[in-house]
Image: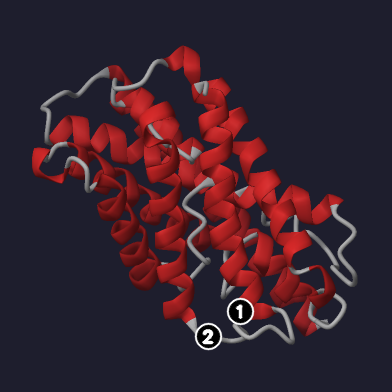
Amino acid sequence: MSPFLGEVIGTMILIVFGAGVCAGATLKKTYANNPGWIVITIAWGLAVTMGVFAVGSISGAHLNPAVTLALAIAGSFEWALVPEYILAQMVGAILGATLVFFHYLPHWKETHDPAGKLGIFATAPAIPHTFSNLISEMIGTFILVLGLLFIGANKFTEGLNPIAVGLLIVAIGMSLGGTTGYAINPARDLGPRIAHFILPIPGKGSSNWGYSWIPVVGPLLGGSLGAVFYKALFAGEVTGLFWLVLGIGAVILASAYAFGKKQQGEMDASKVA
């Protein structure tokens, strides 16, 4: 199996289990309906664990464009392979979401909540706030990348890496996931969101494209910051890339803050009117 196909399969497994638990928890007339946040976070952790076990020896099981980009920045992955891996992850995410759709086929008509149906495929903020939503995704992915690099630096975890990574995902979900649903993975959010847009889901409503850039930009930026932070503090390497990533991050955050302020002003004005 090629690394490209490995990333497709691994990401597909991730989404089948991850979106699958969201579907079971959300859709009506399933035995798994409304199990709570703990069940969902544990299932997502196990989803990552199984994806890593499946293809870790084939592709390294990145399963996440933010991780692929961060590893390239950290110098442990070839830049030339980054586009190929990201494409594979997107394909796998769309395929995984499609399998979840067919698995729960009769339950979509029984559920009359468009937002809940979208939540099976993609994330949304608990409180819409552009700046803080972006910050949440950045912090979650920053911690994810640091955790992955910490795990990789410890030889005693060899063979147990998939379990350690899964536990890291559970910890992030329980501790930091309540604000935005912790996409922390552009493919995990954008791929299934595309599937939601394309698939003939009864009563599905909007795919919320206005929010879709945050779970893409936030993880990519947060993961990149995690990589340069690790190199600077733990490897003692402060390169031009460190300052470039920080500069890009500052510009994006400033733009998000200004956009959020404008958005809030418009909302306040509409309430007065």
**Amino acid type, label 2:** Pro
Q: Residue at x 85, y 54 (%)?
A: 199
**Amino acid type, label 1:** Ala
Q: Is residue 134 left or right of residue 88?
A: left
Q: Which mark is residue 55?
A: none
- Label 2 and label 1: CA atoms lie apart by 6 Å
User: Residue beneath label 1, please?
Assistant: 25
Q: Is residue 128 left or right of residue 82?
A: right
Contact between labelled residues 1 and 2, with CB atoms less than 8 Å apart: yes
Q: Residue 212, image x and y in percent? A: 67, 52
The residue closer to the viewer here, 219 or 2, is 2
Q: Is residue 95 left or right of residue 247?
A: right
Q: Is residue 155 left or right of residue 223?
A: left
Residue 16 position by quadrant: bottom right
Disc 2 residue crowd, few under 14, some 14–19, many 20+, Cα 10 Å: some
Quadrant for the C terminus in the image: bottom right
Q: Is residue 39 above or below residue 161?
A: below
Callout 2: SS: loop
Q: Residue 116, image x and y in percent? A: 71, 75
Callout 1: SS: helix
Q: Residue at x 25, y 46 (%)?
A: 161
Number of numbered markers:
2
Q: Residue at x 54, y 43 (%)?
A: 11
Q: Which mark is residue 35?
A: 2
For the question of whether residue 125 can be seen, the reply is: yes
Q: Residue at x 39, y 50 (%)?
A: 141
Who comes first in sequence, dot 2 or dot 1? Answer: 1
Q: Residue 247, image x and y in percent? A: 39, 32
